[in-house]
Image (spheres, helix red, strand yellow):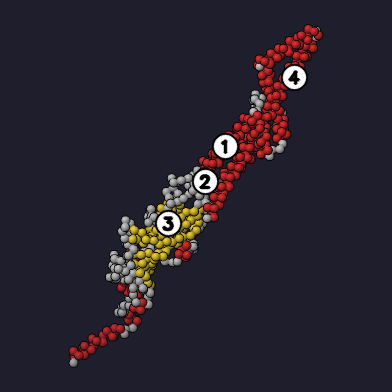
Amino acid sequence: MVPTALGALLALLPLASTLQSPADAQHGGWMPEPPEPALRRLSHSLLAHYQKGTRPVRDWRTTTNVAIDLMVYAILSVDEKNQVLTTYIWYRQHWTDEFLKWDPTHFDNLTQISLPVESIWVPDILINEFVDVGKSPHVPYVYVSHHGEVQNLKPIQVMTACSLDIYNFPFDVQNCSLTFTSWLHHIRDINLSLWRQPELVKFDRSVFMNQGEWELLYVLSHFQEFSVKSSDSYAEMKFYVVIRRRPLFYTVSLLLPSIFLMVMDIVGFYLPPHSGERVSFKITLLLGYSVFLIIVSDTLPATAVGTPLIGIYFVVCMALLVISLTETILIVRLVHKQDLQPHVPEWMKHLLLERATILLCIRDRKKLSQSRMQSLDTSGQVENNDSTAKLTSYVCKDPQECGAVGGTRSALAFAGRTEGSAALQEVLRETMAIRQLLEKREEFRDVAREWLQVGYVLDVLLFRVYLAAVLAYSITLGTLWSVWRDA
């Protein structure tokens, strides 16, 4: 009897311990441990015997299909010299892991769990155009659903090589590719596909920060297979990021100052051709344009591949300014100091004073040339005295004319003997000298008038040719840049 009673007492001890009051529990009584949370039980159940070093398929002939997606967040920099594009993207991967499946009813209806990315198998998908390690924040977890679907979401700063074409700068559009592919696995092991529809990827600018120099036009996607030296094929997914430069800053700081200087050069042709102020004005413009090119040289993109069209535009504008200065020097030299010039050749008169005036619609050239001659005559008394001195010296230096003067003096001497008047001899001698001087002066005035007419017509002709060249060049560049901007 005693052993039986003792066994019954020992059997009742656990029941008594479970029926103790909360007060007894607070005073150090024993309480049963709560059940383990579903997240812990599920994580332990999934990772206890997981092998992350092998591809997660039960049949090795099964292909792991990885769906990828891309959203462009920002264009950080475009290095034209080194041909490097730096972007910040949101990258997403999706694949099925056959060893990460469970029944939600056994784990409190839990259908999704986050697991450490270091604890599971992750596909070795890289970007072929990588040229530097991306400075990306580390995301330590992935999402896993009860069907075994794994979602790996992470932001990446991508520094990739890109063939940048700056010929159309500052209206250039760049097309850079991001090629995602498995570095080791063939297409029969890992295949790639697009997570969303191509149309949704193309025009998705929901997260793009478009306040910088570049704006995102669209993102194209393309799947293809490639092989190396007839070996097994690899799958790759290409994303073409198409961006366009905003040209307003460069238009204001580069194009408009150059256009203003060229307009002032054209306006400078309206200065009188016989005035030396035109030469000084155009030399000042050429010097100012040279300083402008030195200032903007750091703004232009520099590449070893080619020169942007805007650089060619600046060079041509400089050449036009040099041509304009050369034309001005030629005209000023032609119409200046006409006193000792010969007469205008007949062929030049025929071409410039007859044919060219009709072609250029110059109606009042004679009246204009006379007014210019009057302005030349009234330019200063010192110049007139110099011209008279030149004419006098010219008369004395010619032997034939000196002989004619000697004959005239003999006639005057003979008249003086016959008439016997010394005063009359002096008056006649001075009168003949003045008449001869006036005839020579009138002859030089006619020569100067002819050369001034030639210079005026030639100046108008060259100005219109120059203006036509500038307009044709401007229209061509404007058309090209408009087409490239709207393309």
Label located before the other in sequence (2 or 4)? 2
Residue 323: give its label: 1
Label located before the other in sequence (4 or 1)? 1
Residue 177: give its label: 3
Circle 2 sits on which residue? 310
**22 versus 2 height, above or below:** above
- Circle 2 Cα neighbour tier, 10 Å, few/some/many (<14 / 14–19 / ≥20): some
Which quadrant of the structure image shows residue 176?
bottom left
Coordinates of residue 169 in the picture (x, y in percent): 50, 49
Horizontal side of residue 357 vs 25, given as left or right: right
Label located before the other in sequence (2 or 1)? 2
Are dots 2 and 3 in contact, CB under 8 Å? no
Secondary structure of the residue carrying tag 1 is helix
Q: Nearer the viewer, residue 460 or 50?
A: 460
Disc 2 to disc 4, how far (Cα)? 64 Å
Secondary structure of the residue carrying tag 2 is helix
**254 versus 51 height, above or below:** above
**Tag 3: amino acid:** Ser
Horizontal side of residue 209 vs 120, given as left or right: right
Coordinates of residue 418 in the picture (x, y in percent): 80, 8
- Circle 4 Cα neighbour tier, 10 Å, few/some/many (<14 / 14–19 / ≥20): few
Which quadrant of the structure image shows residue 1?
bottom left
Q: Which residue does the image show at 36% across and 77% down from the upper left? A: 104
Coordinates of residue 476 in the picture (x, y in percent): 56, 47
Query: For the residues carrying marks 4 and 1, which lies nearer the camera in this image?
Result: 4
**143 versus 81 height, above or below:** below
Circle 4 sits on which residue? 435
**Tag 2: amino acid:** Ile
